[in-house]
Amino acid sequence: MTAPEPVINDVSPGLKGALTRYRVFAYIVGVGLLALCAGMILEYGFQQKQFVAIVAPAHGFLYVVYLVITVDLGLKVRWPIVKTGLILLAGMVPFVSFVAERKVTHELAPKVTSAG
């Protein structure tokens, strides 16, 4: 005879908002990184530096906001440091932030819906 699955009642009250913020910024940072990559192609392939001059600082600022939001979510969900670090690094590799966002959303969706 096995014990019943424990009910998760220790869900952080701000989890839904933290997850929503994370999802929005994961997409913003992912699109910004793709724009930065396109700008670097323009800069080094066609000597057009003006696009990178605008996109690079904006992406850098938004990435820092992504870091803060991801750490906030990690603290609310009580992720291990290594997992939080890997999700933080996801914003540095093109397309990986989209993959990480999907995995995090699928992992936390049951907790968010049970929190009401």
Image (tube, rainbow, N blue to C red):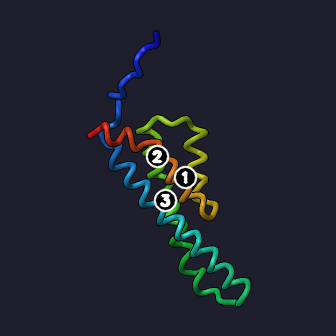
* Horizontal and vertical percent position of residue 58: 50, 72
In this figure, which residue is indicated by the disc labeled 2?
A: 106
The secondary element bearing badge 1 is classed as helix
* Horizontal and vertical percent position of residue 51: 58, 84
* Horizontal and vertical percent position of residue 30: 54, 65
User: In the image, is 116 to the left or to the right of 91?
Assistant: left
In this figure, which residue is indicated by the disc labeled 3?
A: 26
In this figure, which residue is indicated by the disc labeled 1?
A: 100
Residue at image position (59%, 87%) is: 50
Q: Are marks 3 and 1 in contact (CB under 8 Å)?
A: yes
Three-letter amino acid code at the position of disc 2 = His
Three-letter amino acid code at the position of disc 1 = Ala
Determine which quarter of the picture holds residue 114.
Answer: top left
Residue at image position (67%, 78%) is: 40
Q: Are marks 3 and 2 in contact (CB under 8 Å)?
A: no
**Residue farthest along the top direction in this orientation:** 1
Instruction: Judge by depth and name the residue closer to the eye, 79 or 102.
Output: 102
**Residue farthest along the front direction in this orientation:** 1
| Disc nearer the start of the sequence (2/1) | 1
Classify the position of the C terminus by image quarter: top left
Separation of marks 2 and 1 at Cα, in angstroms: 10 Å
Disc 3 crowd rating (10 Å Cα; few below 14, some 14-19, many 20+) is many
Instruction: Judge by depth and name the residue closer to the eye, 23 or 103.
Output: 103
Query: Nearer the observer, disc 3 or disc 1?
Result: 1
| Disc nearer the start of the sequence (3/2) | 3
